Every structure is written in structure tokens, then in C-alpha cells.
Amino acid sequence: MAHSFRTMLALAKTQLKRNLRDPITSIVLFGIPVLLLLVFGALLGNTNNIKLRVAVINESNHAFAQQFTEALDNISVISQPDDALSFEEARDKMKNGELDGIVELPHEFGNEIAGEPRGALKVYYDTADTQTGDIVASVMRSIVDESNQQITGAQQPITIQRESIGVNQVSAFDNVFAMFTGMAVLMVGVFGVASSIPADKKSGILRRLHVTPLKSSQLLGGTMIAFGAIALIAVAVMTLLAVLVFNLNMHGGWLTYGVFMIFATIMMLGFGLAIASLAKNSTQADIIGQVVFLASLAVSGVWFPRALMPELLQNITFAMPLTPVIDGIREIVGEGATLTALGPELLVVAAWSVVLYGFGAKLFRWS
């Protein structure tokens, strides 16, 4: 047993050195996740300086319309083009992504009735970007409500006060950190392990190793240890950057975080093993890996919020491999969750690990 384990470690050491010396491997498995974390972390760090690019089209000749337009110039969140635009010009700019919305004051806007200016302004937005459109409409609604209060001199009977509740002062960056850390571990599995084994088959390395006393369990174990070390190094680098650069506040225990990431890494490496055993060559492994990677991102809430999915689909996507990893990291970092509290997530991780390693070991062939 001891000799078998030493053989496994020696193979892992060789695999680790070989992969770390490969610049492409380092860029893909380390550089891309770290770069994404830095870029999105920097963007989220400037959320207090949001600017909505809005063109204001004043078609009215009434004095109040002119006053309202001038008041919009003083709204810090709204950035208007330097040049006056027609509606058609503004629509073309919005189509090209140069504007977030258009506010039009029609001809009758500001017409006085019973001594008070009246009118309905129009807010246009891109149907392909309803989220930004909702933000523009919300800002304009707040401006209109304030104007109405000034005109009538009366407080609105019912108002809305928006207050954010910071649970343990969780920031938007904490959610991004959870997503990209989980993605980094998945990448090591589906792009690292899944590509390495077929490549060694093609180069004849596995065929030469097969004639030695080396067992398949030692080969696979050494490969998992090597790529497991790479995944945990990537996690450590991203976590260190998050703490030092973006002031990540770990509300949970560091030991809990470390143990959970080890379990998550074991499962993700199982994906690589299953793909490598199923694929007949590197091309097939790359294609299957891409499908698994993109599908995992699609159903785990990275691209589309799970909260907006139907309840049945939410329950299904929770059982997908990347979802419990992201949820677990988020709960540890933001809510201080313990391993006991992460029972459902760990159960999904364990179930996938058993299935993937069983499948991969059964289908593995030396050539």
C-alpha cells in the first residue's frame, strides 16, 4: 500500500511539473479565471459611479418642458450626449449600443391646465436589454414623482422607500467571486484532466507506461492529485487576490472554505476523468468538455439568474454539479455557513463524485 501510494505521488509530481511548465495550460487554467475576476471585480468596485447614457428629445415649446430638460442636466446618474439629437439619430445610437435609453417630451408636454403643467413623457429602451430599460424607467419615475410633488405642493399619499438589507454586509463582488472560483475548478476538470489523458494516449506515453508494473488506479490517482493541486493553487491565487485587492470579507471559517473546495475539486476532476475515458481522442474530449462547460454555466446561474427560472427548473438545476459549488462558496463567504449547513450541497457533490469516478474508471483504457 505504501509503495503504491509513493508511486502515485511520484507520478503526480511529474504530471504537475509538466503541466506547470506548459504556458498554454497556465494561461487557460490560471490566467483566464484570474483575469475575469480582476475585470469584473474592478467593474463592480465602481458601482457608485454608474452613468446612464440617455438622450433627451424635447419636442415641446412650453416653458415647463425647457425647465424640466435643464433639470435633467443636473441629475448625476444621467449622462446626455453633447450634441442635440433627433429621435431618429438617438434611435440609431441606441441600436448601436451608444445609448441606454431615450426620453421624449411630446409637443403637449408642459401644457398648463388649471394653472398646473401637465403631460406624459415617453421612455424608450432596447427590447433586447430590458434590464437597463427598467433602470432608466425607474430613474425617470423617481424624477417625475419629485416634480409632481413640487408642482402640487403635496406629498404623494403612497410612496416607496427602497432600502437594501446587507446580510453580513455581502457585496456584489462576493457573488462574482463564488461564480468565477467555481468556474476555475470546473475548467481544470473539463479542460485539464479531460485533455491530458487523451493527449498521453496519442503520444504513446500511456502505452509505454502500460508495459510497466504501474496500475491504472495509480495512473488515475496520480493524475487526479496533480490536477487537484493545480485547481487548489488557482483557488488560492484567486482567493488571495480577492482579499488583498477587493477586500473580500470571509464570514465563514477558512477551514470550512478549504475543506469544501477540496470536495468540489474532487468532483470536478471526476468530470475530466469521465470525459477522458469516454472520448476516443483529444478532439472528442475537447468537444465534450466544451459542451459540459457551457451547459454547466447556463444552468448554474452564471448567465441567467436561477431565481427567474420556473420552480421545477430551479430544483433540477440545483442538482447540476456547478450549482452547489457556487452556492456553497457564496454561503460560506457571505453567510458564514458551516459544513453541516451545507449538507444538501455536499450531498449533490458526493453523488456526482461517485457516479463520475465509477463511470470514468470503468471506461478507462490505456490506448
Image (cartoon, rainbow, N blue to C red):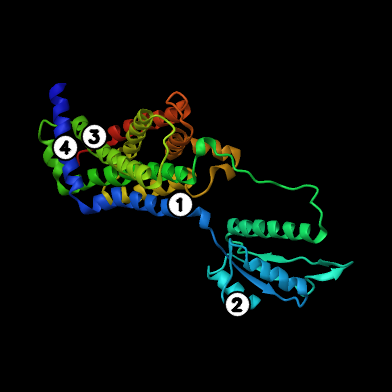
In three-dimensional space, the C-alpha distance between marks 3 and 4, rounded to whole angstroms, equals 9 Å
User: Comparing marks 2 and 4, which lies closer to the viewer?
Assistant: 2
Dot 2 and dot 4 residues touching (CB under 8 Å): no
In three-dimensional space, the C-alpha distance between marks 2 and 1, rounded to whole angstroms, equals 33 Å
Identify the mark nearer the N-term, 2 or 4.
4
Q: Is residue 139 above or below residue 160?
A: below
Residue at image coords 72%, 71%: 67
Tag 2 residue: 89
Mark 1, Cα crowd under 10 Å, few <14 / some 14-19 / many 20+, is some
**Foreground residue, 88 or 211?**
88
What is the secondary structure assignment of the residue under circle 2? helix
Image side of residue 165 versus residue 237, left or right: right
Mark 2: which amino acid? Glu
Image side of residue 115 versus residue 277, left or right: right
Split into 4 quadrants, where in the image is the N terminus?
A: top left
Tag 4 residue: 13
Tag 3 residue: 225
User: Comparing marks 2 and 1, which lies closer to the viewer?
Assistant: 1
Split into 4 quadrants, where in the image is the C terminus?
A: top left
Identify the mark nearer the N-term, 1 or 4.
4
Residue at image coords 58%, 64%: 100
Mark 2, Cα crowd under 10 Å, few <14 / some 14-19 / many 20+, is few
Residue 252 position, x and y percent, is 42, 31
Residue 164 position, x and y percent, is 59, 43
User: Comparing marks 3 and 2, which lies closer to the viewer?
Assistant: 2
Residue 217 position, x and y percent, is 21, 30
What is the secondary structure assignment of the residue under circle 3? helix
Mark 3: which amino acid? Ile
